[in-house]
Amino acid sequence: MHTPDSQGNGPGPARRHRFPTSPPGCAANPLERPSDRLERRLNRVLKAVLVAALPLVAWAGGSAAHTHFEQLRQTQVAERHLVTAELLADARSDGGSSGTSAGARALVRWSDQAGVHTATVRVAAGQREGNRAQLWLDDNGNTTSSPAPAGSVTVAGIAAGTTAALGASAFVGGTHKGIRWAFDRRRFKQWEREWQLVEPRWNLREQ
């Protein structure tokens, strides 16, 4: 199909009209408003901040948590010590029956420089009178839990780093939504003002 060319010299190839676009690296779209350009630039800045800061935030959060829990573990190791105790009765469950409950307890006895001690403590299920059990004591000679294993410190560091990274991502995502909401609100108000100017003329044309 041919149509007259722009000079009116007869038929020429039909031309397709399309809105200009502005892909990355090309000239700006002339239909793009200043607010659109500003919003696009702010979004680029947010993306750059996210890419650059996310690893640093994750490393800082994980490193701080690892240091904290490692110091706590070292303190526990220094303040707690292991002793061997003898069961004075068969292990019984928390419900009072003898046997195989994971929550078994037994009366045990051990001795140290301060003398002979007895206490009812948690022991492995199925332990019998006369068996040996390992107990952790604090500096005051009270029974306590074992020090945190080294692996738990690593897990805590990874969890803290992941949480920090997710928090940073959520913050940047929320900032992006806030910027978009602010610009959309501004554009809607601008469109409303422009329509108030155009509507009377439009109605007159229809009449």
Image (cartoon, rainbow, N blue to C red):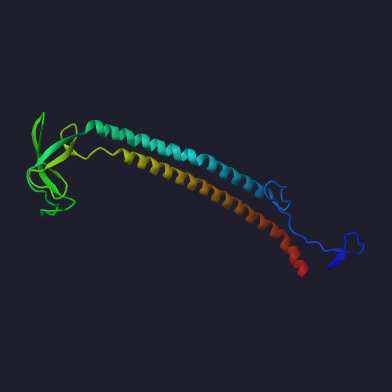
From what the image shows, is residue 175 above or below residue 203? above
Residue 120 at x, y = what percent? Answer: 12, 43
Residue ID at (88%, 60%): 6
From what the image shows, is residue 54 above or below residue 180? above
- Decide if residue 202 is on the left or right side of residue 156: right
Which residue extends farthest right? 9
- Decide if residue 157 is on the left or right side of residue 129: right
Determine the image quadrant of residue 160.
Answer: top left
Instruction: Tell me how many marks there are.
Output: 0
Residue ID at (74%, 51%): 30
Front residue of 34/15: it is 15
Which residue extends farthest front? 131
From what the image shows, is residue 1 above or below residue 64? below
Residue 102 at x, y = what percent? Answer: 19, 51
Position of the C terminus, as image quadrant, is bottom right
Front residue of 191/134: it is 134
Which residue extends farthest top? 113
Residue 128 at x, y = what percent? Answer: 9, 47
Residue ID at (73%, 61%): 198
- Decide if residue 61 is on the left or right side of residue 73: right
Position of the N terminus, as image quadrant, is bottom right
Which residue extends farthest bottom? 207
From what the image shows, is residue 121 above or below residue 192? above
Front residue of 126/26: it is 126
- Decide if residue 27 is on the left or right side of residue 122: right
Residue 155 at x, y = what percent? Answer: 36, 42
